Amino acid sequence: MPIEDDIAALVVQESTLTLPSFTPDIAWQIGTTLRDLAIARNLSIVIDVRRFGSPHQQLFYTALEGTTPDNQRWVARKINVVARFHKSSYHIGRILEQSGLSFHARYTLPEEDYAPHGGCFPIHVAGSGIVGSVTVSGLPQREDHNLVVEALCLVTGRDHNSLRLPA
């Protein structure tokens, strides 16, 4: 899919997948939905759902069989992207790819702390804005992204087929 089409689809995803509120129970629902999808598909992923603030509050976390500490490091770096830019980590990565610039060249931030790769999606609450994130690490980045979108569609009652990025 052309980068421009991906970016347009990412904008739609980010504006559509909003929640009326975000509580620890909703974080648990998002996290367990992702975990159930991963177990049913025999996926080795790390899942993190958190509320932003100072400090961030981790509300759900699991590392499934086959993951490594590197997956947790990827999670942390993807979260930093979403917390900073209020867009999905894949969205920022596609913007960079379109511009031809590296993350450091565009933003002068240390790449060891930021990963503009798919898998972290902003939690957007209607009337409040971006309040947290849901992150997956362990699959190719587009699949990480699509898995998070699928879980958010299930939780919000949206049609995943109309919102997912093509494989």
Image (cartoon, grey):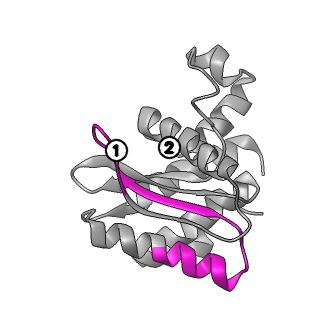
Q: Residue at x 63, y 45 (%)?
A: 74
Mark 1 residue type: His
Q: What stretch of residues is rendered in magenta?
A: 32-58
Residue denoted by label 2:
79
Q: Residue at x 57, y 48 (%)?
A: 75
In the depicted view, which residue is nearer to us: 11 or 90? 90
Q: Residue at x 43, y 60 (%)?
A: 16
How far across and down, in percent of the image, does residue 165 sit?
67, 60
How far across and down, in percent of the image, does residue 70 sit?
69, 47
How far across and down, in percent of the image, does residue 127 sit?
21, 52
In the depicted view, which residue is nearer to us: 159 or 77? 77
In this rendering, does residue 61 appear at all? yes
Q: Is residue 43 left or right of residue 8?
A: right
Q: Quadrant of the C terminus?
A: bottom right
Tag of residue 56: 1
Q: Residue furthest bottom?
A: 40
Q: Is residue 108 left or right of residue 59?
A: right
Instruction: Report the mark closest to the observer, 1 or 2.
Output: 1
Quarter of the image for residue 97 reads top right
Q: Is residue 36 magenta?
A: yes
Decide: is 140 above or below 98.
below
Instruction: Name the secondary structure under disc 2.
Output: helix
Q: Are marks 1 and 2 in contact (CB under 8 Å)?
A: yes
In this rendering, does residue 158 appear at all? no
Q: Is residue 167 left or right of residue 108?
A: right
Q: How crowded is the residue under tag 1: few (<14 C-alpha within 10 Å), some, or many (20+)?
A: few
Mark 2 residue type: Ile
Q: Is residue 79 left or right of residue 139?
A: left
Between discs 1 and 2, the one toward the N terminus: 1
Q: Is residue 147 magenta?
A: no
Measured Cα–Cα span from mark 1 to mark 2: 10 Å
